[in-house]
Image (cartoon, helix red, strand yellow):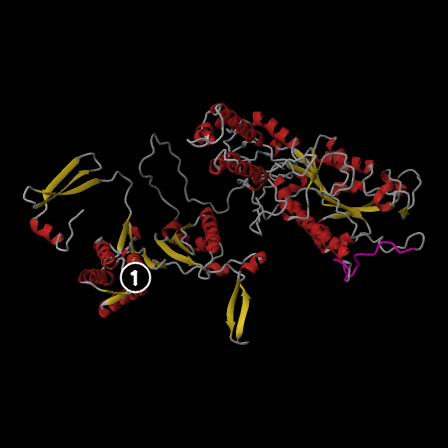
Amino acid sequence: MAKQQKAEPCPTGSEIQVRYCLVRRALAFDQSNLLDFKLMETWTEKLLQSRLEEPSPGFARTTMKQLELADRKLFCILAEKTREGIKCTTTGRPLDLVFKECTESSEVPALLQPQPISMSAQPERTREANSNAGEPPAKKPRPSNEDAVVENSAGGELETHMHVDTTNVFPEKADANFSDFKQVDDVGTKADKPYVFLELCAGSASLSAEVKKIGVEVFAFDHDSNRHKTKCKVISMDLSQPYAIDRISAMIHNCVLLGVHIGPPCGTCSKARGIPMADGSAGPQPLRSKSHLLGLPGLRPHDRARVDAANLLYSQLGRLVEILECHNIPWTIENPTNSFLWDLPFFAFAMAHGIKFDCHACAYGSTRKKLTSFLANRDEFQAMSRFCDDVAPHQHEGWGYDSNSKCFNTAKEAEYPLQMCQQYARILEGFMDNTLLQAKTDRMLPQIQPKGRKTPQIIPEFLDVTSCVLDAVPAVLRGHVHPAWNKVAFGVEATCVDMKAAYKQLPLNPCEYHRTVVSLWDVQHNKPSCFLMRTLPFGAAASVHHFLRVSSFLHSVGLHAGLCWGAFFDDFPLVCNVANRQSTLSTALGLKLEPFGKVATMLGVELDLESATDGFIRVRNKASRVEEVSGCINEILQCGFVDASKLPSYLGKLQFAEAQLWGRAGRLALADLREATVHKSGSVPVTPEAREALLVLLERFTNGKPREIRASMPCKPHLLFTDGALEYDTDGRPEATIGGVMCDREGKVFCFGCNVPESLLQAWQARGRMSLA
């Protein structure tokens, strides 16, 4: 209590961390009774939304520094507006009363506007330099170019990889910028991008330090438990996690990767384990063997954990090598020549697509004769192959255990010699003229289509091309189409994707199994038993929310893929042109579709497209629905009463079925039926009014005209306003009048009015109604 505890600053290296900080601040304001949480949350959403909005060409995305300046400016204005105090008064909280006005002040939104690239590049770089050590720099804005294509260092086109969210929650270190996973459209040409070198498992980062001297921007990554003394900035990131590989993959789209070097830790793969010590005592126990590359059986828990962690890292690095090779980016892997790493299945792809060569560390100035190997996908790296006999004679220090420094001498050779790093940097410098990189891109890549045509088409798309200059575009352009289009009859067909299993298609997180225990009678053992539900349970409040998230996601993906469809819970009505039937089937996300047809069943109704070419479609109830509803009505009419507990279900079915019919008579009958049965309990007798309404509904369901939806040209509508009045004269006799005003689409106005005949008025009042509105 005598010493105040020092508060650690919150990390703000990414959008999600900044959001968490702003949410905690909003909660603090609300708990202090200074400012409503909803107002602060609205401001937080506005800040982050401005960060995610796509800027106009020539402008950079709003930076985190701009968000900070806008936030500071807001509180300066709040201070000016609340000079009399911010404590709660009888009129409310002063900050609540002026907060919206301050956020809309012209000084605040102006700070959130995207800046021209030349103006915004420097603040973004400053933010990167001051970011946390564990956060990789954010992407740098570059000029957009309408004709630009996404290129890597080799000039090939790339595809943006979709971010995979496997757990539906953010992982522990998921602090990557949201902008790294957006679809890249205008990222500039290769000339606009900086040259970048990546060193993974960097250790001391001596290689990055030398590469940086040749004018290349370097990013060195290693785990936060890195024990080496670094020679340049090393970004702390767990490379064994999937988000790390996704982060590095995103860098491919933002810069020209001059090369990527990977130096995986070899502690678990070392064959030096098991060699006895100089004094005859046993050395470190082996963790792998030729027959057990993924780990010896029976390892101690601590050793097993080390091997599993190394295998996870190797798996992710092997996946990264495949990505780099796919994008034709130079890569190298270094490890001792006699390491088990070269035999692991994780690096089988690298071994198949790379060139392996050896060298001695002493040939580069090291004090020990360490035989190490490089695996690379460029022949130029063979210049690294240098042996002890290739240089002047020199002395070698011994191996084994150093009792003075309390460590093995192999650990002292983990850092690359200076001359080796300089030789590696010289090879990369040769890549910068693009001649070596371009040589390999001249080959044909079957998975990448060239942009434009360099040779004439073998089969032209058009029989004839005619160019003409028009003073004004006419309402209709006429011309000849390709003969293939004449063979396809125009028409529209529909079907429906029904996810009949619904909730049972969505698995639960195993961590939530303890919340889905159900008890059922076990007929085999004649006792109650407990069971686990491994999918979304029916009846749970959260099940609807999570299922609708998936449903909305599928609907959104389909729209982006070009499907013309809707979404209603687990039903997806889908419409397409007859000519596009096959392409629609292949685009429909792999979902099982019913055959397309002119009449499609969906959501309890039939959609009739037979007359779509004439400009209208019909919607009618399914035959089974008509049979079901008619059966309910006949049962009620025969019994003469209805169970009040079933009334809501009956009325719901009747209302849905009536909505698919043309006209409004059914709505009036439903209103009469509700009025006759409302606020009743037990067995409700069918009154004459209710019977009459049921007969009207029965006639409509069996013989009613289907609802028609007609297509019309966009134009102004006719506006009709009607009204009625009921007044009483001096003798107490009612006088009813009706009237209306209509404005047609041409602007002409018409009006009418008349008295309601007394006989009709008496019929309306026959049931005791006094108000006829």
At label 1, counting other C-alpha atoms closer than 10 Å, the crowd grade (few under 14, some 14-19, many 20 or more) is some
Q: Residue beneath label 1, please? A: 647
Task: Please tell me whether residue 78 is drawn above or below residue 16 in the rendered image.
Answer: above
Residue located farthest toward the left when viewing the structure as drawn: 731
Instruction: Say which amino acid is labelled 1.
Output: Leu
Is 178 left, or right, of 585 in this rendering? Answer: right
Residue 710: x %, y % from top left: 27, 49
Quadrant where the N terminus sits is top right
Residue that appears at 46% across and 62% down: 501
Residue that appears at 63% across and 28% down: 126
Name the magenta segment's main secondary structure. loop
Task: Please tell me whether residue 234 is drawn above or below residue 275 in the rendered image.
Answer: above
Q: Which residues are magenta?
A: 281-297
- Name the one closer to the observer, 613 or 595: 595
**SS for dot 1:** helix
Residue 332: x %, y % from top left: 73, 44
Residue 767: x %, y % from top left: 15, 55
